Structure formats: structure tokens, C-alpha cells
Amino acid sequence: MSFSPALVYDFIFLAVFSFAAVKSWQKGFLAGLTELIGAVLGVGIASWGSRTLAPEVYLSFFSDSVSTRVEQAVAQSGGDIAAAVQGLDFLPESIRAALAEGKPVVALESTILSHGMPYPENLDFAHRVEEVIRSLGAIPATCAIVKGRLKVGLTAEELEIMCRAENIGKVSRRDVAVYVALGRTGATTVASTMIIAAMAGIPVFATGGIGGVHRGGQDSMDISADLQELAHTPVTVVCAGAKQILDIGRTLEYLETMGVPVIGNQTADFPAFFCRKSGFGVDYAAQSEAEIASIIHAQRGIGFTAGILVGNPVPEEYALDHEYMERIINVALQAADEANVHGKNITPFLLAKVKELTGGESFETNVQLALNNARCAARIAAALCELKKAE
Ligand code: PSU
Ligand code: MN
């Protein structure tokens, strides 16, 4: 015969009960009987109460408590406690719930709004891109830093602030801590949006074009922090390639050195933003978004922490001519040189110049390619959710 805990409890209960019975009996028959009945009723009510009332009390007061939310946040941020603690504050409930339920979420950047497009067209775009993602059953999460807080998913008011772009800085990796410490508001680039997306546990992010090695970068060493981020942060970035303002060949060489897979979405050509081809190839031409999801899944399964870059060409009907863009970009580069623009200001300067020189013609292309990337990212995110469910 083995001693189970239940048996031990029964034995203790019987012993206590017998002791109480004998003690009651000693007080005289009637008094003893009354006391005994009282004790039995008391034990009965206590045991009924603990079974029926306690779970109710537990559920309403403790179960969705801070500890549970911390557990969820830690799980979502891949075990990173620091990220989880921030996450309790920066993840809106809708996005937290979507991630917990295994629903597809697509991260979006805010520099494309504040430094890449004019107001109010950028606000219209900001709502349209979120709508495109929703129409495909995914949840959009535009990232930014608002008053020193990392944000995943902006309110309509916050989107408006980003788009008005008054005193809105451009925040890359190295600026994040400064903005958090000083309570500043800034728009996040590809690099810092990847950081926030990774903290939140969002694996897919759609943008327009990534930063890269600038022309003459071999001398100036002007290489966007986006490339380093792709090397280290496990987020897949869907882009329409890189603008010809950059040295696309060296950008791709850098990505190869850093071990970042460059995948074409149904194309063998790495696209050049306004144009479907850059003259350079991708590592692998994926057949479909589902196939891209399987590559992401495998990358995580192996334990690699690098990101993945997906090149998704602008739809044919909106593509601009390569030679024409090359001429425009050369004029813009010349202007930047004459104005002696350097560092983080060069990309916004060139973007504004290109827009000015194309008389806004390039703007519609810019909008369309970004919407197209959002579609691609939403499909990848959905396929990735299916793969995780099937695990
Ligand atoms: N290229 C574009 N549009 C953009 C950007 C780049 O065609 O809006 C923005 C992105 O936010 C990108 C950033 O992450 O510029 C790169 O800036 P830098 O080269 O300073 O890292
Ligand atoms: Mn730079």
C-alpha cells in the first residue's frame, strides 16, 4: 500500500475530527452534539466555498493580472524581459491579442511618412496602407517613438502628428535611446522599426525602399544602419528594392557579407524602387509568398537571428523608366554635393529633390509600390501564421 497525499489528508482530517468529537463529548451530550453539528457544517461550507467561490474570486481578481500579462509579454518578446517590460506599455491590446491568438500582423515604418512624403498626401497614404493590410485579414502596426515611448500601432491622432512632421526627428538605431531618455517624438527608419517589431514579436514588416551603401560609400563610409539591422534582427523586410540614389551593387555585396538572404518575390531581379530591375540579381527567386514564409520559418528553426530582405518589384503599370530615373538621380546627387549635405540628412534631401525634379510624377509610383509591399507582407505574415499553427 502506498501513501498518496489524499490518504494523508484523510488521516489528518479524521484525527482532528475525532479529537474535536471527544472534546465536545466531554462538555455534555447536548452541548457536545450542537458543537459537533456546527463543526461539520463549518467544514462543509468551507469546502463548498473553496471549490465554488474561490475560482470566481481568482478569475475576477487575479487571473488577468499583471503576472499573466508579464508572462504573455515575455513569451511574445522571445524571452527578452527588458523588451517585455516596455511591451506592457507600448503594445496596444488589439495587437497583443492578435499576436497571442496567432493572427498575422504587419509592421510599418513612419520615416516614409514624415521624411518621405508630403502632407497631407502622406496621411492619406498612411490610412490606405493600413486598410490594404486589413483587407487581407492582417493587422497593421505602424511604429514610431512618441514622447519617448516606443510605439507599435499608432492612433489616428499619432498618425496625424507623424504626417505633419513638425519637429519630428528621423530615428535610426543610434537615436533610439536619446529619444526615449529625452521624451522626444520621432519617426522610425527601417532599422529602428525592425528593432521595435522584433521587441513586439512581429516577424514581418513592409516598407518602400531600404537604406543602403551610398554612391561613393567606399570613401565616405556612408552605409545605412538598415543593413546592420538586417544582419542582426529577426524581422523580414518587404521592400521594392533600393533607390538608385544608392550604390545598389555594393548594397547587395554588403548584405551578402552580413549573411542576409535577399529573396525576390516572383522575380530573379533585385528591384530599384521606381523601376522593376536594378541590373542586379537576388539570391533566390521565390515562387510565392507562401514559399517566402517557409524560408522565414526555416531561418528561425535553424536559430539564425538575421533578418531577411524581400525584393518586391513595383507593379508594371506604375514602373518608371530606368534611364529617365538615372538622369534625375544624377542631378539630385549633384545638388546634394553642392549643398554639402551629409549623414542622416542626405537620404531625405535626395528623396525631396527627386520628387521636385519629377514634378511629383514619382509620387504615385511611390505610393503604389508601398501598397504593393503591404499586400505582399500581409500574405507572407498569414502564411507564416499557418506554418506556426501546423508545428
Ligand atoms: N529610402 C526611400 N524612402 C525612405 C527611406 C529610404 O526611398 O523613406 C528612409 C527609410 O526610413 C530608411 C531610411 O530606413 O530612409 C534610411 O536612411 P539612412 O540612409 O540615413 O539610414
Ligand atoms: Mn547614412
Image (cartoon, rainbow, N blue to C red):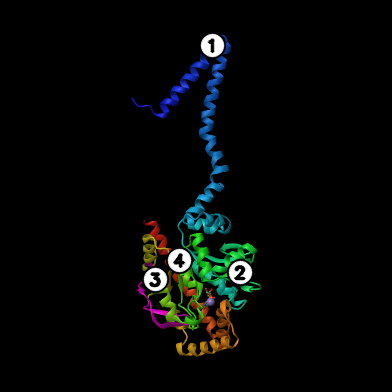
Q: Is residue 29 magenta?
A: no
Q: Position of residue 230 (x, y in %)?
A: 46, 69
Q: Determine crowd level at label 4: few under 14, some 14-19, many 20+ residues with C-alpha closer than 10 A.
A: some
Q: Position of residue 322 (x, y in %)?
A: 45, 87
The amino acid on which the numbered mark 2 sits, given as a three-letter code, is Gly
Q: Earlier in the sequence, mark 3 or mark 1?
A: 1
Q: Is residue 382 left or right of residue 56?
A: left
What distance separates the C-alpha of mark 3 from that of mark 1? 84 Å
Please tell me the numbered disc located at residue 25.
1
What distance separates the C-alpha of mark 4 from that of mark 1? 77 Å
Q: Is the residue 190 above or below the residue 214 in the image?
A: above
Residue 359 in view: no
What distance separates the C-alpha of mark 1 from that of mark 2? 79 Å
Q: Is disc 4 in contact with disc 2, using a CB cutoff of under 8 Å?
A: no
- The part of the chain drawn in magenta is 267-290
Q: Earlier in the sequence, mark 3 or mark 4?
A: 4
Q: Could you tell me which quadrant the C terminus lies in?
A: bottom left
Q: Is residue 286 magenta?
A: yes
Please tell me the numbered disc located at residue 261.
3
Q: Earlier in the sequence, mark 2 or mark 3?
A: 2
Please tell me the numbered disc located at residue 186.
2
Q: Is disc 1 in contact with disc 2, using a CB cutoff of under 8 Å?
A: no
For label 3, the SS is loop
